[in-house]
Image: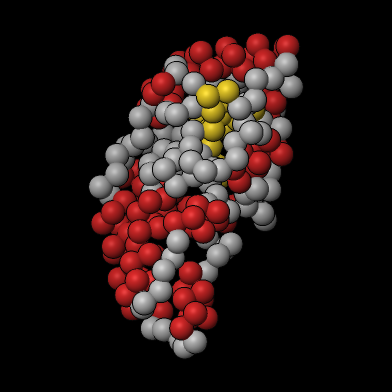
């Protein structure tokens, strides 16, 4: 395991912007209009895998036993989802961690199982479009929890996985980062608070709680003398 942090790699959904509650809410409303319930507990269990892992429309059609006007429903659902997402601010601490990591000479990346247009569009919308590398679901053969996305970003950045720190909000994302050989900070979102983050090297309530420099120092120390997985604070 490396010591010096040469790259900081962010997940996107639920970590940079809380898109997860809006996406769930928009789908839950579709289900409700058809007399069905999409539980938050189930939705939380699929977070991090990417859009191909679960097909809500197909699930709803199976429950109802009939085909739906997918195009019309998806158009309305996307409009509602966009309405909810654009009301979200950048989550606390994200700007500061980016700034401090860059000041320390670390390269900045994004590794997301989501669609590139979704990720890039929202990053540009909130003014966070300056990254050294962004890799999304369509850029790799396997999305999280496979290590492919993190390996791809590390290769793009020219850093060894052992010299990079990932920041994730889901157990699936943590698994991907650890499988790739990165150290990982977990920041549970409202939708993922019940996930098992025991594999993370550090668990924070918010990126605003601890400066990146402090986390980088602790990661370097743990690399030299043993880990501190799961620490909250």
Q: Is residue 140 left or right of residue 99?
A: right
The scheme the figure's colours follow is secondary structure
The residue nearer to you, when weighing 225 against 82, is 225
Residue 135 place in picture, x, y as percent: 55, 45
Residue 50 place in picture, x, y as percent: 55, 56
Q: Quadrant of residue 3?
A: top right
Identified at 64% across, 33% down, the residue is 198
Identified at 30% across, 71% down, the residue is 76
Asked if residue 38 can be seen in this view, the reply is yes
Number of numbered discs visible in the structure rendering: 0
Identified at 38% across, 83% down, the residue is 69
Residue 92 place in picture, x, y as percent: 35, 30
Identified at 32% across, 75% down, the residue is 33
The quarter of the picture where the N terminus appears is: top right
The residue nearer to you, when weighing 124 against 184, is 184
Asked if residue 10 can be seen in this view, the reply is no
Farthest residue, direction bottom: 66
Q: Quadrant of residue 175?
A: top right
Residue 208 place in picture, x, y as percent: 39, 23
Q: Is residue 138 left or right of residue 102?
A: right
As displayed, is residue 49 above or below residue 159? below
């Amino acid at each position: 395991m490396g010591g010096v942090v040469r790259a900081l790699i962010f997940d996107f959904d639920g970590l940079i912007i809380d898109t997860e509650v809006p996406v769930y809410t928009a789908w839950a409303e579709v289900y409700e209009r058809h007399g069905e319930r999409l539980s938050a507990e189930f939705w939380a269990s699929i977070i991090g895998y990417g859009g191909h892992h679960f097909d809500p429309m197909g699930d709803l059609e199976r429950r109802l036993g009939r085909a739906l006007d997918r195009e019309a429903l998806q158009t309305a659902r996307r409009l509602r989802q966009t309405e909810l997402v654009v009301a979200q601010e950048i989550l606390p601490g994200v700007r500061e961690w980016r700034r401090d990591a860059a000041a320390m000479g670390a390269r900045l990346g994004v590794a997301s199982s989501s669609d590139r247009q979704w990720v890039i569009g929202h990053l540009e919308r909130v003014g966070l479009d300056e990254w050294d590398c962004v890799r999304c679901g369509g850029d790799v053969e396997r999305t999280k929890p496979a290590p492919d996305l993190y390996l791809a970003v590390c290769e793009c950045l020219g850093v060894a996985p052992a010299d990079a720190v990932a920041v994730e909000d889901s157990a699936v994302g943590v698994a991907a980062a650890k499988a790739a050989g990165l150290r990982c900070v977990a920041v549970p979102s409202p939708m993922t608070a019940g996930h098992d983050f025991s594999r993370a090297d550090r668990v924070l309530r918010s990126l605003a709680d601890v400066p990146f420099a402090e986390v980088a120092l602790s990661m370097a120390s743990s690399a030299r003398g043993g880990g501190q997985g799961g620490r909250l604070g």
